[in-house]
């Protein structure tokens, strides 16, 4: 049974729709990554998965059942770690033990607090009695994580857990979270821009843009201003002098999304499609190749002017095109397949 199943979900804040998901499942003991620009809906989705809010419309099932926010069915079983740790004005030990005390589960409490601190790389002897105000940002985030891990949750939700911490703390937060999955079968859902989280450890990566899910890579988003071009199209001149050509949008939409599944990488001078699609082909440079966890797909980043297009390519395709960082390539697209938001 899936840990989560979302179907036909729409969520609003006032009159504004902030999330719209047709169908997605999260298997138990899996690691799901969420990626998208600020305002794309990642934090909202995590709040819904943490049962801190209830969807406006649609179904959000937990282990096959509908659950209301803050109910006993998910209390202490699902926990969310936000980017800001928000510790209570108490000692480190009291912060870590708080959830177990609320639950009335205090057998061997001191030892369990010590184990939780060790799991996040904090020496209990040095940190257990320390005040919350005497912690660095990275230490505070690790204490907040220890307070969640001590509960041995079935689901651990992480909202940009390493965005505001030092590299040492970031590494320990990743390690402790993955250990929870390995030892207890904890399901992880993490919103992050950390490529090591996303493509080295995640089983699935979901890409959010304006509250909608997209598959096939991260693609690229482009804002205006736009100018009128030929054939009733709009255009935008990039920093390197190249011109981006797009169709006119519907009223009220001003952001273009290039769906990576609709893009084609071409090799200048070798691919005949380059001649046919010359008006809709942009010259770029490969800046990053990242082999994903399963080993058969490669996240490929291509810089075009000030834009970065990110695609998921089969490993065989990367080898066929002989791609490597700094290699010049073309990105071909059909303007009629552009999506506006």
Image (cartoon, rainbow, N blue to C red):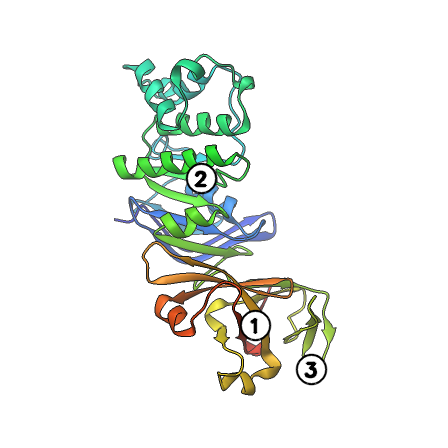
- Depth check: give the residue in front, 288 or 2: 288
Residue 82's x, y, as percent?
Answer: 50, 35
Secondary structure state at the residue bearing disc 2:
strand
The span from disc 1 to disc 3 (Cα, nearest Å) is 15 Å
Asked if 122 appears above or below 65 in the picture, the reply is above
Label drawn at residue 338: 1
Q: Position of residue 204 (x, y in %)?
A: 37, 54
Which residue was labeled with disc 3? 232
Please report the residue visible at 69 percent of the width from the left and 75 percent of the height from the top: 234
Res. 69 image quadrant: top left
Mark 2: few/some/many CA within 10 Å (<14, 14-19, 20+): many
Comparing 153 with 130, the one in front is: 130
Q: Nearer the viewer, residue 204 or 286?
A: 286
Residue at the image point whose x is 41% and y is 19% from the top: 98
Tell whether label 3 touches label 1 (CB within 8 Å). no
Instruction: Report, in whole angstroms, how far the alpha carbon at label 3 lies from the one at label 2.
Output: 45 Å
Percent x, y of residue 146: 40, 26
Residue topped by disc 2: 158
Query: Quarter holding the C terminus?
Result: bottom right
Query: First in sequence: mark 3 or mark 2?
Result: 2
Can you give x and y, in whole percent of width and height, for residue 245 in the image?
Answer: 64, 76
Q: Secondary structure at mark 3?
A: loop
């Amino acid at each position: 049974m899936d840990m989560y199943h979302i179907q036909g979900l729409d969520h609003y804040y006032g009159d504004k729709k902030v999330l719209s998901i047709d169908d997605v499942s999260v298997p138990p003991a899996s690691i799901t990554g969420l990626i998208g620009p600020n305002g794309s809906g990642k934090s909202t989705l995590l709040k819904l998965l943490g049962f801190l809010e209830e969807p406006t419309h649609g179904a959000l099932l937990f282990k096959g059942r509908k659950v209301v926010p803050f109910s006993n069915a998910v209390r202490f079983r699902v926990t969310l770690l936000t980017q800001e740790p928000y510790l209570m004005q108490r000692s480190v030990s009291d912060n870590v033990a708080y959830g177990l005390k609320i639950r009335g589960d205090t057998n061997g409490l001191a030892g369990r607090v010590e184990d939780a601190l060790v799991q996040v790389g904090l020496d209990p002897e040095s940190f257990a009695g320390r005040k919350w105000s005497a912690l660095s940002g990275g230490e505070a985030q690790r204490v907040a994580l220890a307070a969640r891990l001590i509960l041995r949750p079935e689901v651990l939700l992480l909202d940009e857990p390493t965005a505001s911490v030092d590299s040492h703390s970031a590494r320990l937060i990743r390690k402790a979270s993955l250990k929870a999955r390995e030892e207890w079968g904890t399901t992880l859902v993490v919103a992050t821009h950390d490529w090591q989280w996303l493509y080295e450890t995640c089983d699935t990566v979901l890409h959010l843009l304006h509250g909608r899910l997209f598959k096939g890579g991260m693609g690229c988003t482009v804002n205006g201003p736009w100018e009128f071009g030929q054939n009733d199209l709009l255009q935008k001149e990039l920093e390197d002098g190249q011109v981006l050509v797009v169709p006119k949008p519907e009223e009220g939409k001003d952001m273009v999304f290039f769906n990576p599944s609709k893009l084609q990488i071409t090799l200048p001078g070798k691919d005949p499609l380059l001649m046919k699609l010359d008006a809709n082909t942009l010259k770029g440079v490969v800046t990053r190749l990242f082999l994903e966890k399963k080993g058969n797909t490669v996240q490929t980043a291509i810089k075009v002017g000030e834009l970065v297009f990110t695609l998921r390519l089969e490993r065989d395709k990367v080898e066929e095109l002989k791609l490597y960082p700094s290699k010049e390539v073309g990105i071909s697209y059909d303007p009629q397949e552009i999506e506006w938001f």
